[in-house]
Amino acid sequence: MSRATTNDRSAVPHAADSHDMIRVHGARENNLRDISVEIPKRRLTVFTGVSGSGKSSLVFDTVAAESQRLINETYSAFVQGFMPAAARPDVDVLDGLTTVIAVDQQRMGGDPRSTVGTATDANAMLRILFSRLGAPHIGGPKAYSFNVASVSGAGAVTLARGGQKVKERREFSVTGGMCPRCEGRGTVTDLDLTQLFDDSKSLNEGALTVPGYKPGGWNHRLYSESGLFDPDRPIRSFTKKQLADFLHREPVRMKIAGINMTYEGLLPRIRKSMLAKDKEAMQPHIREFVERAVTFTTCPDCGGTRLSAGARSSKIKGISIADACAMQISDLAKWVSGLDEPSVAPLLAKLRHTLDSFVEIGLGYLSLDRAAGTLSGGEAQRVKMIRHLGSALTDVTYVFDEPTTGLHPHDIQRMNGLLLRLRDKGNTVLVVEHKPEVIAIADHVVDLGPGAGAAGGTVCFEGGVEGLRSSGTVTGRHFDDRAALKESLREPSGVLEIRGASAHNLRGVDVDVPLGVLTVVTGVAGSGKSSLIHGSVPASAGVVSVDQTPIRGSRRSNPATYTGLLEPVRKAFAKANGVKPALFSANSEGACPTCNGAGVVYTDLAMMAGVATTCEDCEGKRFDASVLEYRLGGRDISEVLEMPVAEAAEFFGSGEARTPAAHRILERLVDVGLGYLTLGQPLTTLSGG
């Protein structure tokens, strides 16, 4: 009797097993149009659709963002005060969420000290290994770190002992592995003096060619009226002391032109005022000067290894830590596997697993000393994946943003295997993807569209892969498309010569790149494509590089400001109304005084999520009411910024609002498929594509 009762109970599913869906209802983040979807847990779900259709808005900005926000709320108010406060996504219901680990395509930190080894903790394990087994023994793990400088000092310290204050002499020393010449960067910067001044001229004749150092300006008067040298004498005829004062003198207070000022040599002054700044934040003419005047050369003392002589001298089986970091990771994994030392067995096992994960994920061609900032978006994403491959966590939601970007078909199969492995451990895997090879392995597909921007944001299809093929959606129709070869080819107009290319893994490559035609450089991931084009093209070739670096900008930046479109538009409005162009800038005189041109008013609630409310005075239009009275072609400036690019191209192409300079920029935006963007859409809301 009791056995029968037990069987009856087992037929009823447990209440805990009923939560097998992530339910999203009424999602309106960015361009999503009040959509509702149900995502199965412990399955591989692929989100498809054209670029800008709302895939990232649903997966990253809604599901992943809300999961992270809810996890942050479990911490104490004290801890939350140190964490970035995120607002709740614009969605009615989010149910059944699990912990989300987002593995996106954002480039890894571009800090020159960050390498593949430091980003994955492989370097930390190697440092401990060499501090235990390296001969000669030079110190602890810090002695093998290129981020720790060697310092020593001595002095008197005051102690309270037996009610009396006693002074004692103390000495201390820290042995670090940093190369003192390049300070652990591997390269030294040199300024090309011929780009800073013309030594055949005197200062008064305009010898200085640095931007902002024209005769008459304060930067110029600092040198010409310092009294340290004759401003009418050519720089090449300066004495040794005068040249040292001009180029290298340490900061010193002195009276110049009747004013107390700090005089400083030209080289340290330029390093502080220009080279210490972020290149992206510089004005174009200053950035162009810096790129022309600054040369980066391998540090002559450490040979680019970043390490001190002591760290390079300590070896295990003839290999130093510098040699180990310079090895291809697949070779390093074999070397580590050959080490058999019981005293560090747990460390060796962990290091082997990390290095084997690199090989398994298709990054065995990298080396640990490769700068993290030089990795492509796809490589950076896979390096982040390494942390999760051996994780014992289950029932986690992993979110991937186009994990196959930049991968050869050979590598896509390997990536598919990794995604399926994560799923088979009992995890929910959500993938934003375009490649048919990845869509084909999905358990569930959510297709967004039908178009991009305002034409997207709706669910076109939900279901299995076979259902997608026959669904008639844009993705379904193109699922089995294959590219056709061209019948006729253009003739090149010349060649760009690359000789002896040896950047990263290139081995003295000689290539003639044809000019005037579209040339594609192919090969498996890590074969040297980027090294050939970005690292080996001569600086004098005048090549413009368009890479995967994300656009930098705040909520105030938009396609109109970034492309330079707003300049001719402001001038056209000013000319039509007889007022100043500055009135038509939401960052200048025309800004709404209440929200300062932001369109929203932010209320900071400390560790709680801040609240952004639409400005009541301008109703989110960002401009002062008086500015909106001025019109061009029947539209005010806020209405122009709300136009999609395609509509604006027609508006500025003919009639009263005809502005050729604006029309040219808009046509280029339409040509690259961005006709759906509105001119005033904040850059922070744009997808990667």
Image (cartoon, rainbow, N blue to C red):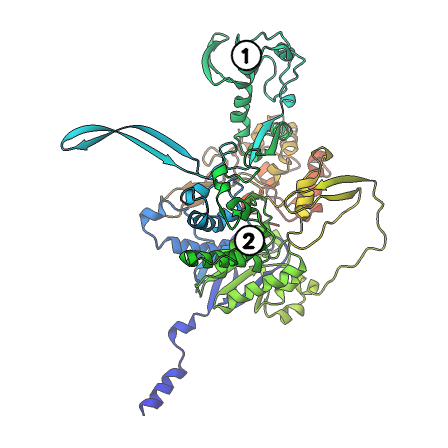
Residue 324 versus residue 443: which sits nearer the camera?
324
The answer to whether residue 649 of the structure is visible from this angle is no
**Residue 170 sits in which quadrant?**
top left
Q: Is residue 545 above or below residue 231?
A: below
Residue 332, disc: 2
Residue at numbered disc 1: 241
The answer to whether residue 629 of the structure is visible from this angle is yes
Q: Is residue 404 above or below residue 505?
A: below
Residue sitting at x 68%, y 64%? 479
The spot of residue 448 in percent (x, y) is 60, 60
Alpha carbon separation for disc pair 2 and 1:
52 Å
Looking at numbered disc 2 in the image, what kind of residue is underneath it?
Answer: Leu
Crowd tier of the residue under label 1, counting other residues whose Cα lies within 10 Å: few below 14, some 14–19, many 20 or above: few
Q: Earlier in the sequence, mark 2 or mark 1?
A: 1
The spot of residue 9 in percent (x, y) is 36, 83
Residue furthest bottom in the image:
1
Q: Quadrant of the N terminus?
A: bottom left
Q: Is residue 548 above or below residue 169?
A: below
Residue 549, disc: none
Image side of residue 151 versus residue 452, left or right: left
The spot of residue 413 in percent (x, y) is 63, 63
Residue 426 versus residue 170: which sits nearer the camera?
170
Looking at numbered disc 1 in the image, what kind of residue is underneath it?
Answer: Lys
